[in-house]
Image (cartoon, rainbow, N blue to C red):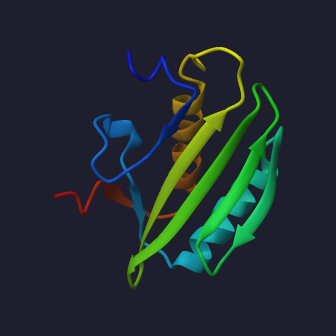
Amino acid sequence: MKVFLSTGQETSENHYDDALKSHYYKTTAKKAIEAVEQSFSKQPGATVTSVSEDRGEISVVIDKPKKALMIITIVSVRPYETAIDFNVSTDTKLASDFGFSRKLIIDSYEKLNKALPFIGTGLHSK
């Protein structure tokens, strides 16, 4: 219910929704940033607006089918273990995006799971 009554979603290590837990990949942060940037540059309606390799952040503006802003955080946990998290805010006048931000995150993770060697989710939860 909470998913459908919000205008945004964020992934985290201990998220109550298993689909929105942090994803880990067997790669370096630099290669993960390149894969994320490449994935979104090919996506119609998406524009990569900022890439900060130093901070491990990428911002993407989604224009279609709905307007949204994505902040993607890439953190190297260990050598060849990198976490990727999403924060999505949907631009809507309504009190809900009807699960759009959640679906956008899940679709993004599915693309990255094909592009990078996926290790697992929520690996470092307490």
For the N terminus, the quadrant is top left
Image-quadrant location for residue 61: top right
From the image, which quarter does the C terminus lie in?
Answer: bottom left
Residue furthest to the bottom: 79
37 displayed left or right of 49: left
Q: How many marks?
A: 0
| Residue 114 in picture, x, y percent from top left | 54, 53
Q: Is residue 105 left or right of residue 83?
A: right
Give residue 94's position: percent from left, percent from top.
65, 14
Q: Is residue 31 above or below residue 23?
A: below
Residue 116 percent location from the top left of the image: 53, 63
Furthest residue in direction left, as rendered: 126
Relative horizontal placement of residue 62, taking residue 1 as reference (left or right): right
Quarter of the view holding residue 64? top right
- The correct choice, above or below, for 108 with respect to 2 in the image is below
Of residues 114 and 20, the one nearer the viewer is: 20
Quick check: 123 above or below 20? below
Relative depth, front residue between 94 and 15:
94
Is 5 placed left or right of 54 in the picture?
Answer: left
Rendered residue at 67%/62% (across/down): 58
Q: What residue do we see at 72% from left, 29% from top?
A: 91
Residue 67: name its quadrant: top right
Q: From the top left corner, tell me how far across and down residue 121 is, in percent.
A: 32, 53
